[in-house]
Image (cartoon, rainbow, N blue to C red):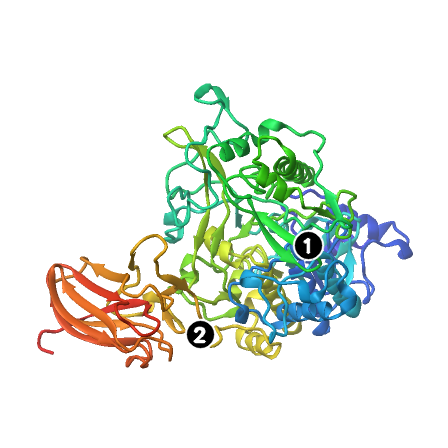
Amino acid sequence: MCGINQYTTHVEVSSQMSLRLLMTFAVAICFAPASNFNVAHAADDQPEVVIYGGTSAGIIAAVQLKKMGKSVVVIEPTDRIGGLTTGGLGQTDIGNKQAVGGLSRQFYRDVRTYYQDPANWKWQKKEEYRSGGQSQTAEEEDTMWTFEPSAALKILQGYVDEHDIRVEYNTSIDEVMIESDEDSGPVIKLVLASSGQIYEPKIVIDATYEGDLLPLAKVSFTVGREGIDKYDESFAGVQTEGPKAGNHNFVKGVDPYVTPGDPSSGLLPFVDPKGPGKEGSADHRVQAYCFRMCLTDHPENRIPFAKPEGYDEQWYELLFRNFEAGETRVPWINSAMPNRKTDTNNKQGFSTDFIGQNYQYPEGDAKTRQEIIERHRLYQKGLMWSLAYHPRIPKKIRDQVSRWGTCKDEFESEDGWQQQLYIREARRMIGAYVMTQHHCTGDAIVEDSVGLAAYGMDSHHMQRYVTPEGHVRNEGNIQAHVAGPYPISYKSLVPKRTECTNLLVPVCLSSSHIAFGSIRMEPVFMTLGQSAATAAAMAIDADVAVQDVDYKKLRERLVKDKQRLTGRNQKVVPVGSLKGIILDDVGLLGAGPEVHWIETESNSQRVGSAYFHDGNTHKNRLMAQFSTKEFEPGRFEVRVAYAPHSNRAQAVPIRIWDGENELAKLTLNQRKRPDIDGLFQRLGRYRFENEVIVQITNDDTNGYVVVDAVQLLPIDDKD
């Protein structure tokens, strides 16, 4: 008699779940010869932790678990580890290099070490390579932030080999079985892989870009974007006029109809007839995906762009019309990687993002997803051929694009295209705690940090729609600053206790769409993978639910492992933490479009998001004005915030007005440290009846002029 009944008395099979997992387990025990069991019972075979997804986060999590003496298996649905880090995203989105620590930082150290070897410079000399932008590597750095996909793969594979990490390739998780306990809560007890292997892990980590364990484990999640009202986020929902909504958009006047000017002829492909929706409202839409292309212009390594089978010229009619309407730029960001290669990404109104064509991907089955991936590849192949060779593309664009092609030595396919699609966002867990825009802006700060995010709130477009004027436009782009490196809550990596107590989710963590746009960077995913693995090991050692891991002990271990949990050499003061009226939204006035204040996120102490400076130029031509009419008339102490430095101006002109009445005219020495917490300097006490106006100019100044924020503190008339 088989002993399976004794086991199943403790198992609840949900009505939504098939009995295949239970039956497979029963058959394996009752009928299979001991040598052929699919259930891994041997101590060496049965991992304590199952990681789903060999992404960069998944591999780093496995390394940390091995370092902590735990057994682990990584289940990877493809035949390549590393996800986007080995799939073309070599232009690292950082935000702030000082926010990256632990094994994540070690990866970028290993990138630098890799490129110190002359043998790894095949297609150009080391001294010929120059990176740019945020990923630029200074000579004194021990890290390097740009790399070829093949280099990243070698480094991550080196970790796998060094730590003897078991990776099951071309394998998916088909089902999990939940054991319910009234005291401890639901637990993932069994995991069934597509290979037929059954695992009995103590902890499971979902490191996929799609959050594929969430529905299997009956853990709450969301897809799409919340409305403004959900978490009181100003950037949430439909944003046709949001921050930087005009970026990556069409030039004016591009017609969306098959026959220009004739709505009855129908819309051109990929224009959403239901868009855009009510401003600020929630919807099902997901920010666009693309392939981060690794291109080269080296003749010996270059595969020219080819017209793909299935090419449909009408797919690119809006591209042609956009150029004919006045677009003059190449629609890409072509960032230099070592060995005369690139990381090429979306830019302008019609580019590599296949806008609106991924809505079914997050919750699609394997067949649906593969069809979407192939459709994206067809679109992008056709796009690149069109830009390089189509006669309706301006010649100067064709001449520039046709110099490039995919690489012979990067990916397995003969045409040089990778299999990894850039899944910018899919499912997001609704867990024990939700990260939101307020954490990005510094208005909310968590106390259980397991890593830092530092990139701006960034969303690519989500739909292409027709304006009331009858023109085509993209919608969904958000580009907004964060208040510097900010902590991510441990509770955002764990589900609600009532849903699952042995699952950790470092990639599709509990976050709003807006906050996820800031968090969703590969260095952060690696950081959270390490932190999740540390928590998993500690939960196993203490025999507790992941929700009950002692944060004090977790923090001690993370710090020991050189994770960075708070901003380094930086103090960003949240607007919401300050008393009185804070004027942080400033009117910046310059004498002409080329004369403007410069926005910065330097490591200096500041209020809220970025501050501004004049670049020590355009003297007598810049003014910043802080103003408000939202106050009760009375006396206020006026304070101004600025970051002091020896290169600042010593006599910055400031004028204070009550509406049209000037109350004071004074100068400020910005080389001197402000009196109040090194942040605010008192400017005096004044009575305001109508409107508070504080003006700062760079007239006749002898150094950099900085503008940050103004604080108004009500003063009792008796004081």
- Mark identifier at residue 660: none
Indicate the quadrant where residue 708 lies: bottom left
Q: For mark 2, does the 10 Å Cα neighbourhood hold few (<14), some (14 to 19), or many (20 or more) residues?
A: some
Circle number at residue 570: 2
In this image, 592 relative to 95: left or right? Answer: left
The residue nearer to you, when weighing 246 against 50, is 246
Quadrant occupied by the C terminus? bottom left
Does residue 15 appear in this view? no
The span from disc 1 to disc 2 (Cα, nearest Å) is 35 Å
Residue 104 in the image: above or below residue 153:
below
In the structure shown, which secondary structural element does the residue marked by tag 1 occupy? strand
Q: Secondary structure at mark 2?
A: loop
Q: Which residue is mark 1?
A: 341
The residue sitting at 35% across, 61% down in the picture is 597
Identify the residue at horizontal 63%, vertical 35% (top origin).
386
Residue 671: name its quadrant.
bottom left
Indicate the position of residue 248 as horizontal and vertical percent values.
48, 44
Amino acid bearing label 2: Gln
Q: How many marks?
A: 2
**Up-down relation of residue 306 to residue 160 (above or below):** above
The reply, left or right, for residue 242 in relation to residue 545 is left
Of the residues under marks 1 and 2, which one precedes in the sequence?
Answer: 1
Q: Position of residue 121 (x, y in %)?
A: 75, 63
Name which quarter of the figure residue 201 lies in: bottom right
Residue at screen point 48% across, 51% down: 513
Q: Residue at x 46, y 41 (%)?
A: 249
Residue 151 pos. (x, y %): 73, 61
In the image, residue 43 lies at what x, y percent?
81, 67
Q: Amino acid at mark 1?
A: Lys
